[in-house]
Image (cartoon, coloured by chain):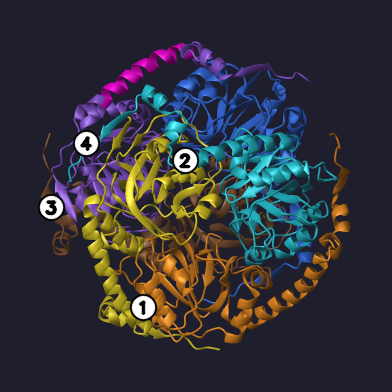
Chain colours: A cyan, B yellow, C orange, D purple, E blue, F brown
Amino acid sequence: MNVVHTNIPRADRAAVERLAASGVATVHEAQGRSGLLAPYMRPIFPGARIGGAAVTVSLAPCDNWMIHVAVEQCREGDILVVAPTSDSDAGYFGELLACSLKARGVRGLVIDAGVRDVRDLTEMGFPVWSKAVSAQGTVKETLGSVNVPLVCAGALVHPGDVVIGDDDGVCIVPRRNAGQVADASAAREAKEAKTRERLKAGELGLDIYQMREKLAARGLVYRQAPQEE
Amino acid sequence: MNVVHTNIPRADRAAVERLAASGVATVHEAQGRSGLLAPYMRPIFPGARIGGAAVTVSLAPCDNWMIHVAVEQCREGDILVVAPTSDSDAGYFGELLACSLKARGVRGLVIDAGVRDVRDLTEMGFPVWSKAVSAQGTVKETLGSVNVPLVCAGALVHPGDVVIGDDDGVCIVPRRNAGQVADASAAREAKEAKTRERLKAGELGLDIYQMREKLAARGLVYRQAPQEE
Amino acid sequence: MNVVHTNIPRADRAAVERLAASGVATVHEAQGRSGLLAPYMRPIFPGARIGGAAVTVSLAPCDNWMIHVAVEQCREGDILVVAPTSDSDAGYFGELLACSLKARGVRGLVIDAGVRDVRDLTEMGFPVWSKAVSAQGTVKETLGSVNVPLVCAGALVHPGDVVIGDDDGVCIVPRRNAGQVADASAAREAKEAKTRERLKAGELGLDIYQMREKLAARGLVYRQAPQEE
Amino acid sequence: MNVVHTNIPRADRAAVERLAASGVATVHEAQGRSGLLAPYMRPIFPGARIGGAAVTVSLAPCDNWMIHVAVEQCREGDILVVAPTSDSDAGYFGELLACSLKARGVRGLVIDAGVRDVRDLTEMGFPVWSKAVSAQGTVKETLGSVNVPLVCAGALVHPGDVVIGDDDGVCIVPRRNAGQVADASAAREAKEAKTRERLKAGELGLDIYQMREKLAARGLVYRQAPQEE
Amino acid sequence: MNVVHTNIPRADRAAVERLAASGVATVHEAQGRSGLLAPYMRPIFPGARIGGAAVTVSLAPCDNWMIHVAVEQCREGDILVVAPTSDSDAGYFGELLACSLKARGVRGLVIDAGVRDVRDLTEMGFPVWSKAVSAQGTVKETLGSVNVPLVCAGALVHPGDVVIGDDDGVCIVPRRNAGQVADASAAREAKEAKTRERLKAGELGLDIYQMREKLAARGLVYRQAPQEE
Amino acid sequence: MNVVHTNIPRADRAAVERLAASGVATVHEAQGRSGLLAPYMRPIFPGARIGGAAVTVSLAPCDNWMIHVAVEQCREGDILVVAPTSDSDAGYFGELLACSLKARGVRGLVIDAGVRDVRDLTEMGFPVWSKAVSAQGTVKETLGSVNVPLVCAGALVHPGDVVIGDDDGVCIVPRRNAGQVADASAAREAKEAKTRERLKAGELGLDIYQMREKLAARGLVYRQAPQEE
């Protein structure tokens, strides 16, 4: 029942890089508003924007043993995605594990639980999205699984899926869709770039998006505010 | 029933600037501890301290259409105040809307819901106080109203009221009270400046505020702690 | 019933400094995973790492009178630990009280409630761990006690105990244990330094901690992932 | 600044009774989805369904003095609506105050804070909607106001407004709208009664509301599920 | 992209009944502690214990259109499982929809959001597990999907899976595992029945489970408590 | 470090019964508003009102092994008080453990975590105050301690202390204070009984408590409400 899947297929590297450059909000829109983790998942420091292939870890609550097992399964360009099987805020991950992951080229961690050594992780520039910060340690007593499908902060993640993280949160793109969603994200960005220039020049969204007719049809009323004072 | 009030009267500009300089905690005290938004309203980046006149937006949950309508009603020096009619953490506002508001001289956003594109908003220096950060988008299907009185994060806001935001949160000053509260805030600051110098010099609040007699009358006992070890 | 204990015994200064240098996560482990405050206690700015002797303040909800009383009991190297007797998010503490504490050499504040003037406190470099940020002020009507044992954010604190705070949270070390826990923390750090070098060099925790046998005995299965596509 | 308004105009009694009979969900819909208190306001026992005229109490956090003042302003058919000026979970109200209110014919309590003596209140059949249950008492030190407009659990309440409470929560109807909203509620109920019979008979909402065309136009696809196994 | 799967295969009816009789805690254990929904999912009234086949509904936040679509896909013995694509506490479901579902033999509702008409639903005896109770209505503007795999309150649900609900919460059993998990649940119950008799007779779990040796080996110390006073 | 204290001294039985009869709100007031557990501790069914002597259990998060150890230390009239060393919502306790405790005359459970088998516990009439209900089980891997002082839901509990629980929550009375607090509770009840009769007869608290002068002195203003309409 407890299994480690080795040598998982990973999303296409070039597509991952393009998705990371687009960022979470754009990618989430571009794939039809799916794959977003719950908004309680926050970065431990601002400004990171990364993408990578998911190595998933399902573990018992308050037990981080399987993270040690998962390190061996990681390659350059991966992101570790960790979810306990029941809700927990303990600190499953700290600076030593980050050193080990960094030595293997792992780009960051997404964990539906707590982390610690936050100052060290910040100095190392190792990005983490977590539900909590807590110095409370965990044990190494119970098996879990590595590289199985799991639910992390409300989203379904398969091993090898694309993980995108930035200040807006974390989004998952299914592995086989990576190229197509990267294309859609790029198209969306191109379109927004044009809109951005018009908005900066003072044009209104009401006009650019041709909303005035629809608003009037729905019955929106404009009325001069009372000018007393 | 859904209305956009145009050309609202706004609080006196000079008073707004003075209030912004005093900051949320001082202004809140100076007007009798009223007008504070709930403490879950947090800035998306630290260090901003702004003031402006409220343009209010009441909108349906998970629908940001009326923000597009509200942009047209904004002038230089305004702050957009947005509240959905039921609780929601979606991301109603992002970088494109901020470009549009910035082009009109709007100073910031206060929203009892979520925002996205947080990294871009930070780089633009566009201050936002929100309940959440979320990449989850919204729709444009249901009408709401612009420049009507509304409740935002537990506080009552009328269009044209003064909005003050800094790292302590957000406070509303009724439009007609702006001058008087700015005076009271300045008086409070002047008094605190004197107290500050005395405290920095090592005097105790117990003496400055003459608390010792009242404490004794209430029965406070001083006792030497046991010195074992 | 309301008492101020004066001249409390304090933890050994040298031990406090050593504990502060080790940080919350290490100290918490080194004393057997006890003494940690709840993870909702967050620093108002990142990067602080302090230690000091606890001056404790038990006060009525929404009443900060006893903080003014407590200031007089503080010495250089102390940390103020404040807990209301019922749950409250108001702002009990601001920049003026921080000026007063700083003039006496106090190193920081730990409060199971709210603080305000966060921008000023950040500029002063006065570290605070709190449950909330709120501009909502308090009154000075009801007595409490200073330097009595109390529960702060779920942890038991005696006056004179060591308080350690950093980005991971806050940990309490009983006064008499300070030296012994500082030794255990240092030993733990020395051991971790060696492990860190091995991990950075690419060795796996699986091998360093000799986990492979135990994992196999528990029945962990390794299986090649399906390679379709 | 602290005032008690006496002899407030109250909503029409007959309209109040009709609104109470319709219940919160229907009334909220019938007045355009406004006036609903936040969903954290829960009844202390199930099954109550009441309506009355609001006597409002704005009080300092952790101070219930003004509830005693408000009792005198209550008449038969009123509902007390209480909101502290900052967030608090203490127990502001218990069985003695309920005895006093009941002697005056008051129908219930709505409080954006905590209550206590819940078993006694249940035995008395005195309905309460609150944010919390807590035995933590309050003080009587600071003035507030009675019968002023206030924000309770996110909704604006004026003295004399209609308050409706049932297992779904609490809704406010502005005093002058009582009759008109009662009419709209009754109309809504009549319409729903017909729909209810059709639904009970097995007709589908898809047909009753004529949704099939709109769904098809939007592109909804029906597809036979795979029948493997 | 928006699809309704019709005629889904459902879990074996006899196995569903056996699982319902065993209850959530037993079934969750019997299938290896998986499939449990988050503990914030609470029943609207106590005492219900049901099982059925999942008809799943993925819908836009604050939009209940697809519930109307889903009704048609329901058969006798089903349970509706509803999850919005972003977090929301609005009231998506009330008494009219329950009448419609009941007419088709549906046994209950599991919804990761809010419901209303709670008093009516209780009187009808229609069980609901939800995250919130709220009178706040929703719209019918945006398509979603029916009978697609989805994440509800943190658990993965496929159409046709077994849903078990009681006062402990909600648990999902994958469709194909229903018989095997029902067997394991029954075995667990039989074993517990024997243990129950021994415990009721006063035997200790320490002896029944033979824990004393293991505790001693781990170093547990028994010590007479000080008898002062 | 992990210890079980046997044969602990317990609070006087007669005093415990008197305290239980007074209830949580009265006892909490009578001992100076101390000893209350956090308001998130809720009964699993309404109407229970119990008192007993605390047998305390400190255990590792997600590990209920020490509850089995604690059963043996319980006597007729005890209440089990359980707190994990870090925050956790798993279900540590169910019907089998309740059978075992009931066989020993234990009156109830107070646990700063989750419980399961809630329907069975309700049918047995075994009262529980908990932070959560969850079917999620725990392991039996790590030692903890029995009958040591601990912090439960923010309150300090020593073994043998009085535990009082009812619909208002849970309150702790230190063992040696039981008689004195029972006397103070009885005196408070006697006083309230007189006040209750006066309030039921229609007298106002304003008069009974002689508040009118103090209110006037503080500046409270009475003003006739505008009678428009």
Do tags 2 and 4 sit on the same chain?
no
Decide whether the magenta segment is chiefly helix, strand or loop. Answer: helix
Is C166 in front, or is A170? A170
* Residue F217 in which image quadrant: bottom left
Amino acid type shown at disc 2: Leu
Q: Are marks 3 and 2 in contact (CB under 8 Å)?
A: no
CA–CA distance between discs 2 and 4? 55 Å
- Give the label, 3 or 2, closer to the camera: 2
Rendered view: F198 above or below D169: below
Identify the residue position indicated by label 2 in the image: A199
Q: Are marks 1 and 4 in contact (CB under 8 Å)?
A: no
CA–CA distance between discs 1 and 4? 48 Å
Do tags 3 and 4 sit on the same chain?
no
CA–CA distance between discs 2 and 1? 56 Å
Q: Is residue F169 left or right of residue A38?
A: left
Task: Find residue F133 and report its horizontal and vertical position in percent.
Answer: 57, 45
The residue drawn where x is 72% and y is 26% is: E15
